[in-house]
Amino acid sequence: MTTTPSALAASGAVELAASALSGWVYTLAIADQERARRLGIVSTPRVRQWHLDLAALGTATVALGAALPDAPRPLQRTLAVGSWSNAMLFLPLAFRPGLAEDPRYRAAVAGSFVTTSVGFVGFAATALRRRRAARR
């Protein structure tokens, strides 16, 4: 018997794969700082943040996609977009740390945080609502 994963679980699985691959970039940034600099990486801590955020958010989206595979599609899309954008917004800072002060970058980060928050809170509300309904 095979099971088709939810769109969110599939997105999270791809995000976890990206995290695994980003570990190579992090390893390079630690093990060969000269080569990393030649590639334009100037902030190893931001590479680490990117790598760990991909892992954490990928894991969370796989878990929620598996726990509530039939959650409303707009909610799944919201969390997937927030999860990916939240993690990926650390990568540009590895190359240009000063970007954190750019109003456009800050707006993107704020949008990502809002999207991620709406997604996680929406999943929590859906889970609680369904749990209450099942207990009646």
Image (cartoon, rainbow, N blue to C red):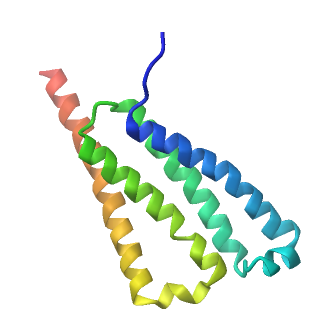
Q: Residue furthest top?
A: 1
**Placement of 62 over or under 117, stated as above or below:** above
* Tally of numbered discs: 0
Q: Is residue 104 found left or right of 42 in the rendered image? A: left
To which quarter of the image does residue 13 belong?
Answer: top right
Q: Residue furthest front?
A: 39
Q: Position of residue 120 (x, y in %)?
A: 33, 51
In the image shown, does 93 or 120 lie closer to the viewer? 93
Residue drawn where x is 45% and y is 63% of the image: 85
**Placement of 130 over or under 136, stated as above or below:** below
Q: Is residue 73 found left or right of 44 in the rendered image? A: left
Q: Position of residue 108 (x, y in %)?
A: 39, 75
Q: Is residue 22 visible?
A: yes
In the image shown, does 25 or 119 lie closer to the viewer? 25
Q: Position of residue 96 (x, y in %)?
A: 61, 84
Q: Is residue 120 visible?
A: no
Residue drawn where x is 39% and y is 33% of the image: 6
Q: Is residue 118 found left or right of 93 in the rendered image? A: left
Residue drawn where x is 87% and y is 66% of the image: 31
To which quarter of the image does residue 25 belong?
Answer: bottom right
**Placement of 62 over or under 112, stated as above or below:** above
Q: Position of residue 12 (x, y in %)?
A: 49, 43
Can you say which quadrant of the picture contains the C terminus?
A: top left
In the image shown, does 115 or 81 lie closer to the viewer? 81
Residue drawn where x is 41% and y is 74% of the image: 109
To which quarter of the image does residue 124 belong?
Answer: top left
Q: Is residue 99 found left or right of 77 in the rendered image? A: right
